[in-house]
Amino acid sequence: MARVGTVPWRAEPRCRRALPLDQETESEQSVERGEERTEAGEHRLRQSSGMSPDQVASNRLSPNVVICWLARHDVAMRWVLAVVMCCLVMLLAAGWTTDRSVPLPDACSAKNIKHHMKLEVGVFTRHCGPAAALVRVNGKSFTIRGGYCRIDPVVPGPAGHTRWFYFGLIEMSGPRTTSAAKGLALVIDPGDHAGPAKVIDGIIQVNGKDLAARGTATLTKGAKGGTFSVVGLGVPQPQRFTGSWSCG
């Protein structure tokens, strides 16, 4: 049975070595005061407990010492546990909010697709149209449905052969706030006729990545589709992305 003045649930044999009552009280008081284990302190401990020097040394890291500390600091440990649990709940809530509470554009309607419309909500743009793209990286393939190919010149004059190709849902400014973005944008020059061309700019957002893109492309007849091979920039080791698209 636990003695009066001790924590009732504490398992005494596991908490400390058996000592006479007066010596045990003295030893407990010295521990509570945080007495340092100096050479003189260890000598007094050997005299009071009858332990050898090796036993004194092993007692420093004994599981009994840890159990005894936990028993004496039950209230403090409960507070620490409560704080840790609160932090975990806050982190989980932040992660849930980041990935699910971000407002996104609605899905493309038949009208949106017919008129090649783009739907914007905050930093997100959903490109609606009959176009689709396929992106490959590291042996994985990602299909992006919805989009359009701009056949009008981006700028007038000598640069009027440059074209933009948009697919899927793109987050237009960083840092990324959700993993929902899945899109592709390519700026191709020349992009208005069949043959080889340059990808002078681009955005790739698949598999949790958000990278700028540069590379080459080959357009089909009438510039209604093509293939591309680009390097995703913005990471320590640039990654190669390949794929194809159809303007629909």
Image: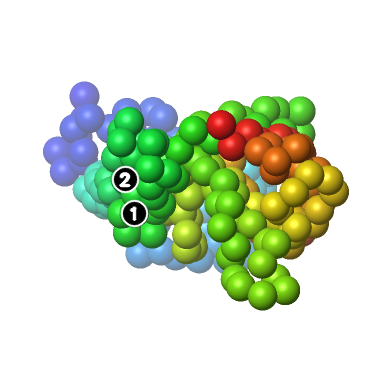
- Give amino acid for label 1: Glu
Mark 1–mark 2 CB contact (< 8 Å):
yes
In this view, the residue in front, 69 or 95, is 95
Q: Quadrant of the N terminus?
A: top left
Toward the right, the furthest residue is: 196
Question: At 59% across and 37% down in the image, what residue appears?
Answer: 247
Q: Is residue 72 left or right of residue 164?
A: left
Q: How many neighbours does mark 2 have within 10 angstroms: few (below 14), some (14-19), or many (20 or more)?
A: some
Question: At 49% across and 33% down in the image, what residue appears?
Answer: 130
Q: Position of residue 125 (x, y in %)?
A: 41, 52
Question: At 39% across and 49% down in the image, what residue appears?
Answer: 118
Residue 217 lies, with reference to residue 8, above or below; the image says: below
Residue 108 lies, with reference to residue 216, above or below; the image says: above
- Give amino acid for label 2: Pro
Toward the left, the furthest residue is: 4
Question: At 56% across and 31% down in the image, what residue appears?
Answer: 248
Q: Position of residue 30 (x, y in %)?
A: 38, 59
Give the residue number, with chain letter if any, for mark 1. 120
**Residue 42 seen from this side:** no
In this view, the residue in front, 176 or 146, is 146
Give the residue number, with chain letter if any, for mark 2. 105
**Residue 236 seen from this side:** yes
> Mark 1 or mark 2: which comes first in sequence?
2
Report the coloring of the rendering: rainbow
* Label 2 secondary element: loop
In this view, the residue in front, 78 or 36, is 78
